[in-house]
Structures are given as structure tokens and as C-alpha cells.
């Protein structure tokens, strides 16, 4: 079985975090005979500097062919004034669009050693492990008509349109139910069916997928504003939450902050399953950006990138036990008090990016 990874470190702290992730991949190859083959290429500002665009066509082609893509981060002040069409973010958007990555998985996990760092009380977040699945390629960010028009009275009118089709809703719902079966077997679907027709359709179609294909999974529905409240009130009531692009954008950012630092947050974006192999196109990346304020200093937290690889093991290669091992190694490192600056308590001397990567590799060795 081929296991080819396309690694796109990108800009800023992306390459620093990715170098530590490669150490982890090397560990799995050396100790678990996983046989990952790594290809590396450019995305973002660094690709623009070489190719005049943030993602070369040849890179796009490889992304379509490999088993999974791991991305660091893109962007930075050097490229802020570029034309919109060639900005570094466009490279990432092109990957998402052409690979048709319609399901964005954002876990919010609270590692026990970091429970004190949450803005919520420790007992509310300790042991938190929820997953938000955000529909990523439809909804109000893409719906037509859109635009700003000039009115006859001299004022202007801005329009965006929330559009969802049966199939767009069903396919992301299937990802949620599928995932729930591997977790607590519960899905909460969220929309605003009280005030939006697209929300009514969302609710009906998610229910349809449940009734026809996943009757064994427990399904409930909650309005998105209520989810926003409940996430800060009693977040541990949730397991898998599936929602649309706009609400998912907001709710996943809210949920992610329950567990502390941006430097800890992984994500996965999944596409349709290949009918022949069942394999989904997939891209894994930390939630954070290129952090120009700390880039080049060797102090970035690589754990978000490393945990993104754990998601890759689980979702692209069905290597759940290895994903568990990697997450346990990260947890052990945190339990041992190893901290980069972004997660260090006052008075704790932080380690650098490389030391954190080495600590994870050492913990893998100790736990395996
Ligand atoms: P950012 O996530 O890069 O940084 C926000 C803050 O968090 C900064 O103070 C940064 O130092 C800190 N931080 C982020 N990741 C960290 C880590 N791993 N370890 C320690 N500290 C960390 O977001 P910002 O500043 O809004 O954007 C910076 C650049 O990144 C911009 O060019 C933006 O367009 C781009 N960006 C790219 C994303 C991507 O590649 N997916 C996502 C978000 C922003
Ligand atoms: Mg957001």
C-alpha cells in the first residue's frame, strides 16, 4: 500500500513546525515500518517568489495524486501588498477548492496539563474532547448572487446568499455520522432553522441521512446561537457537532479557544471518498497562521502541526492506534512540564521549537 505524503511547509513558522513533524514521521517509519514517502514542495509566499503564483500547477497535480497533504502555514508581511489573485492565501484556497475538501474537522481537546490555561474554569474543560465539522465549500461564502451594488438613491447594497443543496448537506452529514461511530456515537447538527429556509433544509437532510443510513447514531439538533452559549456554559456535553460554513467558522474558533493556545490546534479537511478505494482526499494543517511576529526565532510551538499529522494517521491511513500513541506522546510531554513560550505558565522557562519536537520523539520512544 502506498503512503505518499506531500509536505507543503509554506511561510513563517510553517517550515519550523513542519521540520519537527517530519522528525515524528521519521520516527514512525523507523519504529513502526509505516513506509511513509515524503515529497516536499512550495505553497504561499515562498511559491510566489519562485513561480509568480502561490501554488504552481505541478504542485496542485501532486496534491491530487498523493495520499495526504500536510501544510504548515502561508502568508506574511512581505506579501501583504500583492494583488488579491496571487496572495499567499490563494494557494491554500486553490488546494481546498480543486481537491473539493468540503468537510473541515476541528477538534477542541483539552490536555489535562493545560486545563489551567483555559479561560474557563478547569472543571468545565478538563478532559474536553469535541469535534466540530464545518461544511467548507458551500453556504454564504460562495452563494450567488453576491456583491455590492449602487442604488438609485446613492446608497449601496451589499448582498451574500446562503445556498445549500441536498447533496452538499448529505455528504458532510455522512462524514459526521461516520466519525461519530468511531467516537461516542452522538452527532449534534446545528443551523438556524427557526429563521432560515436553508436551515430548514439542513435539518431535514441531516435527519434524512440519519434515518436512512445511520439510524444507530444518536442525532440531535440545536440552533447555532444556542450552541454558542452552551459551548462556554457546558462544553463537555458535546461530542461531534456538524454545521454549515458560516456557523462552523465562528463556532470552531470559539470552541478552539476553550482549550488554550492556537499553537495546540490541529485541523483536517476531507473530500469525497473514492468509490473504488474508499479513500478521501485530505489536507491536514495547524489552525494557526505563519506568525510573522515570532518566525525565524525557533520558538514556535510545533504541536499543532504534529497533532495534525496524528489526524492524518487516523483519517487518511486508518492508523488509529498510532494516532492515539502520538497524542499520548504529546500529552506526556505536557505532563512532564515541557512548554513552548505560548503555553508556558509564568515562571516556567520555555523550550524552543526543536526541543519540543525532540521531546515528542523521545516520548514516542518511551511509550511505544
Ligand atoms: P497567526 O496564527 O499567524 O498568529 C496569531 C498569534 O498567535 C501571533 O501572536 C503568533 O505569534 C501566535 N502563534 C500562532 N501560532 C503559534 C505557534 N505555533 N506557536 C506560538 N505562537 C503562535 O495569525 P495572524 O497573526 O493573524 O496572521 C499572520 C499571517 O498568517 C498572515 O499573513 C495571515 O494571513 C496568515 N494566516 C495563515 C493561515 C494559514 O496558513 N492557514 C491562517 C491564519 C493566518
Ligand atoms: Mg475563522
Image: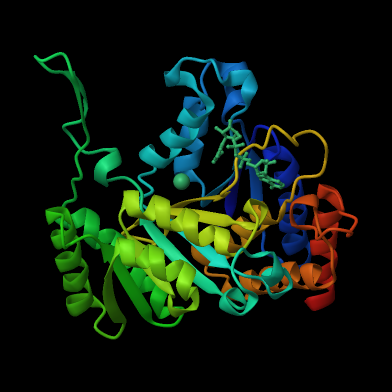
**Residue at 29% over, 86% down:** 216
Q: Position of residue 280 (x, y in %)?
A: 41, 57
In the image, residue 109 lies at what x, y percent? 58, 68
- Of residues 132 and 171, the one nearer the viewer is 132
Residue at the far bottom in the pictured view: 216
- Rendered position, 289 above or below 258: above
Q: Residue at x 27, y 38 (%)?
A: 142
* Residue 64: x %, y % from top left: 44, 42
In the rendered image of this protein, does residue 167 appear above or below residue 152? below
- For residue 327, side relative to residue 274 (left or right): right
Q: How many marks?
A: 0
Q: Residue at x 46, y 29 (%)?
A: 90
- Relative to 361, is 39 above or below? above
Camera-nearest residue between 228 and 162: 228
Snapshot quadrant of residue 335: bottom right
**Quarter of the rendered structure image containing ligand 1:** top right
Q: Residue 29: in sight, yes or no?
A: yes
Q: Is residue 175 visible?
A: no
Amino acid at each position: 500500500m502506498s503512503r505518499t505524503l506531500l509536505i507543503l511547509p509554506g511561510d513563517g513558522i510553517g517550515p519550523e513546525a513542519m521540520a519537527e513533524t517530519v522528525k515524528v514521521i521519521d520516527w514512525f517509519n523507523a519504529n513502526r515500518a509505516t513506509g511513509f514517502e515524503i515529497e516536499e514542495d512550495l505553497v504561499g509566499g515562498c511559491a510566489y517568489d519562485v513561480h509568480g503564483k502561490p501554488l504552481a500547477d505541478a504542485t496542485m497535480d501532486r496534491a491530487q495524486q498523493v495520499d495526504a497533504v500536510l501544510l504548515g502555514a502561508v502568508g506574511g508581511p512581505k506579501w501583504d501588498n500583492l494583488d488579491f489573485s496571487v496572495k499567499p492565501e490563494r494557494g491554500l484556497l486553490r488546494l481546498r477548492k480543486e481537491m473539493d475538501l468540503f468537510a473541515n474537522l476541528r477538534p477542541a481537546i483539552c490536555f489535562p496539563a493545560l486545563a489551567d490555561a483555559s479561560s474557563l474554569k478547569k472543571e468545565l474543560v478538563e478532559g474536553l474532547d469535541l469535534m466540530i465539522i464545518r461544511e467548507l465549500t458551500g453556504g454564504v461564502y460562495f452563494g450567488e448572487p453576491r456583491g455590492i451594488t449602487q442604488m438609485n438613491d446613492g446608497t449601496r447594497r451589499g448582498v451574500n446568499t446562503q445556498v445549500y443543496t441536498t447533496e452538499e448537506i448529505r455528504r458532510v452529514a455522512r462524514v459526521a455520522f461516520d466519525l461519530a461511530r468511531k467516537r461516542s456515537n452522538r452527532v449534534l447538527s446545528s443551523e438556524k432553522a427557526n429563521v432560515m429556509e436553508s436551515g430548514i433544509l439542513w435539518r431535514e437532510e441531516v435527519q434524512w441521512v440519519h434515518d436512512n443510513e445511520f439510524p444507530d447514531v444518536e442525532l440531535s439538533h440545536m440552533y447555532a446561537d444556542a450552541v454558542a452559549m452552551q459551548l462556554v456554559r457546558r462544553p463537555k456535553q458535546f461530542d461531534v457537532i456538524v454545521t454549515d460554513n458560516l456557523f462552523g467558522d465562528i463556532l470552531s474558533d470559539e470552541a478552539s479557544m476553550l482549550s488554550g493556545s492556537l499553537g495546540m490546534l490541529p485541523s483536517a479537511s476531507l473530500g469525497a471518498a473514492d468509490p473504488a478505494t474508499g479513500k478521501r482526499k485530505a489536507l491536514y494543517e495547524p489552525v494557526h497562521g505563519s506568525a510573522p511576529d515570532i518566525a525565524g526565532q525557533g520558538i514556535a510551538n510545533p504541536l499543532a502541526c504534529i497533532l495534525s499529522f496524528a489526524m492524518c494517521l487516523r483519517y487518511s491511513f486508518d492508523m488509529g492506534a498510532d494516532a492515539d500513541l502520538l497524542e499520548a506522546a504529546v500529552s506526556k510531554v505536557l505532563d512532564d512540564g515541557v512548554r513552548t513560550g505560548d503555553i508556558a505558565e509564568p515562571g516556567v522557562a520555555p523550550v524552543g521549537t526543536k526541543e519540543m519536537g525532540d521531546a515528542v520523539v523521545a516520548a514516542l520512544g518511551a511509550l511505544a
